[in-house]
């Protein structure tokens, strides 16, 4: 099929490149010429494992090209995906201005029957919004259909998630349009759920909101475990063994960040308010999430006797492993707090250093975890990179001014850390000594 994908962020670029790898003629569309130039040279403008190799192969096979013209790309395509950003406004509702602009330009390019697919994360009613914009530009109703096809990608495993999806959701008013999407995704051998537009749009928000709720539940439990001396890891294992609950997303930590959970939970709250429901449960989910990093900062500050004159090493900057995305990353909150209270930060991350450096030039950026902990009063595990899981903890302890380890992702065991000479603090478990250090 002839496909255009408007937007070359995580969702758009991965979607376009994967569809090209399946043998479709794909145009990746963006107004950012610099990004397009990089893609056309086989370079990925974002860090995502396996993406650059797939771009190079699709370009070499002749199935992938780029364009900065939405109109021309829509004119040449059977299916046009809208995959632009929908960032939250101040009230938490998604900003649909980019979706509106793209819909208007697509309308100008429609000359024969075209399916317009909302791939962006959008609230209920967005399919009708796009359809009305296209109709308002004079395009006859029988010349296009709007379909909702939400994505369920995880940064760091987006290629695999696209090639091996759990499910494919297709919302449409016209069954024939839905069937064209089913045929497009047929090589993936995955069950497609066909719904109306509103239901498909709601599934995306509801899915991420439920996962965020599950994470916030185990994080709330971690705070109880710290207070009573229980261990949240063992508790999670016991809870997750129940087949009705499952173990996925029951890993206590510093809380969720990134581009999806924060935006989609707020979007779900905003959508609920639009239809007269006060989703108080999700408001508490956000509050619990925000409290996790604040609680860890309190523990660190208390043990150090304040941050003034102290040096803290951060192991990890990205919001999760296998990405350079720092949107709503917990590391940024830590940096702001420590620097704001007179402390110093030494940080390392396999891929996100250059991104963070633009915003926080006063941080000392290190090439290795060992360099970052040298002379530090405390070390904090912020991101669960595999590169951090097999570190020589005895070497870490020997390099530090004060051998204090705060494990925000629970990647080490207390026994191993303490045997290495570290005083070990982990999310969801109490430590034998949390008295302030002597100044």
Image (cartoon, helix red, strand yellow):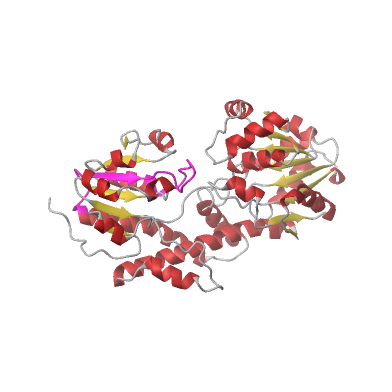
Q: Looking at the image, which is closer to me, 220 or 50?
A: 50
Q: Which residues are magenta?
A: 304-332
In the picture, measured across the screen, residue 146 lies left or right of residue 287, that is right
Q: Looking at the image, which is closer to me, 143 or 381?
A: 381
Q: Is residue 317 magenta?
A: yes
Q: How many marks?
A: 0
Residue furthest toward the left?
438
Q: For the stretch drawn in magenta, what is the main secondary structure?
A: loop
Q: Quadrant of residue 58?
A: top right
Residue 381, percent from left and from top: 35, 50
Q: Looking at the image, which is closer to me, 112 or 64?
A: 64
Asked if residue 48 is positioned above or below residue 192 in the image, the reply reads above
Q: Quadrant of the N terminus?
A: top right
Residue 299 visible in the picture: no
Residue 352, percent from left and from top: 43, 39
Q: Quadrant of residue 204?
A: bottom right
Q: Is residue 291 magenta?
A: no
> Which residue corresponds to the image point at 47% horizontal and 64% vertical from the top-left?
250
Asked if residue 322 is positioned above or below residue 244 in the image, the reply reads above
Residue 387, percent from left and from top: 41, 45
Residue 377, percent from left and from top: 22, 47
Residue 433 visible in the picture: yes
Q: Quadrant of residue 371?
A: top left
In the picture, measured across the screen, residue 25 lies left or right of residue 300, that is right
> Which residue corresponds to the image point at 64% horizontal and 41% vertical from the top-left?
12
């Amino acid at each position: 099929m002839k496909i255009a994908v408007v937007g070359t962020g995580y969702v758009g670029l991965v979607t376009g490149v994967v569809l090209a790898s399946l043998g479709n003629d794909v145009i990746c569309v963006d107004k950012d010429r610099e990004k397009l130039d990089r893609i056309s040279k086989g370079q990925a403008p974002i860090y995502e494992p396996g993406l650059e190799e797939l771009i190079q192969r699709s370009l070499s096979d002749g199935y992938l090209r780029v364009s900065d013209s939405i109109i021309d790309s829509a004119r040449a395509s059977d299916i046009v995906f809208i995959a632009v950003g929908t960032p939250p406004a101040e009230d938490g509702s998604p900003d649909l201005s980019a979706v509106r602009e793209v819909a208007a330009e697509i309308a100008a390019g429609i000359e024969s029957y075209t399916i317009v697919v909302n791939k962006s994360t959008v609230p209920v009613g967005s399919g009708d919004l796009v359809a009305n914009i296209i109709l308002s530009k004079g395009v006859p109703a029988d010349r296009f259909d709007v379909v909702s096809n939400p994505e369920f990608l995880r940064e760091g495993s987006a290629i695999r998630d696209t090639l091996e999806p759990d499910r494919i959701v297709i919302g449409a008013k016209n069954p024939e349009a839905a069937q064209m999407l089913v045929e497009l995704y047929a090589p993936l051998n995955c069950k497609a759920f066909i719904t109306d537009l509103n239901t498909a749009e709601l599934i995306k928000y509801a899915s991420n909101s439920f996962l965020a709720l599950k994470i916030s539940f185990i994080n709330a439990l971690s705070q109880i475990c710290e207070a009573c001396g229980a261990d949240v890891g063992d508790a999670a294992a016991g809870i997750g063994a129940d087949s009705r609950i499952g173990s996925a997303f029951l890993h206590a930590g510093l809380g969720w960040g990134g581009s999806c959970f924060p935006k989609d939970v707020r979007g779900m709250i905003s959508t609920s308010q639009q239809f007269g429901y006060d989703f108080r449960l999700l408001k508490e989910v956000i509050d619990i999430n925000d409290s996790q990093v604040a609680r860890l900062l309190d523990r660190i500050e208390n043990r150090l006797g304040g941050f003034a004159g102290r040096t803290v090493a951060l192991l990890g900057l990205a919001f999760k492993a296998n990405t350079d995305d720092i949107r709503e990353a917990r590391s940024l909150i830590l940096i702001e707090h420590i620097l704001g209270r007179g402390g110093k930060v030494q940080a390392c991350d396999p891929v996100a250093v250059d991104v963070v450096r633009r915003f926080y030039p006063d941080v000392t950026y290190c090439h290795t975890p060992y360099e970052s902990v040298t002379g530090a009063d405390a070390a904090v595990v912020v991101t669960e990179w595999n590169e951090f899981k097999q570190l020589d903890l005895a070497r870490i302890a020997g390099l530090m001014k004060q051998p204090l380890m705060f494990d925000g992702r629970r990647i080490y065991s207390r026994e191993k850390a303490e045997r290495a000479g570290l005083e070990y603090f982990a999310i969801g478990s109490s430590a034998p000594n949390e008295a302030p250090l002597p100044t």
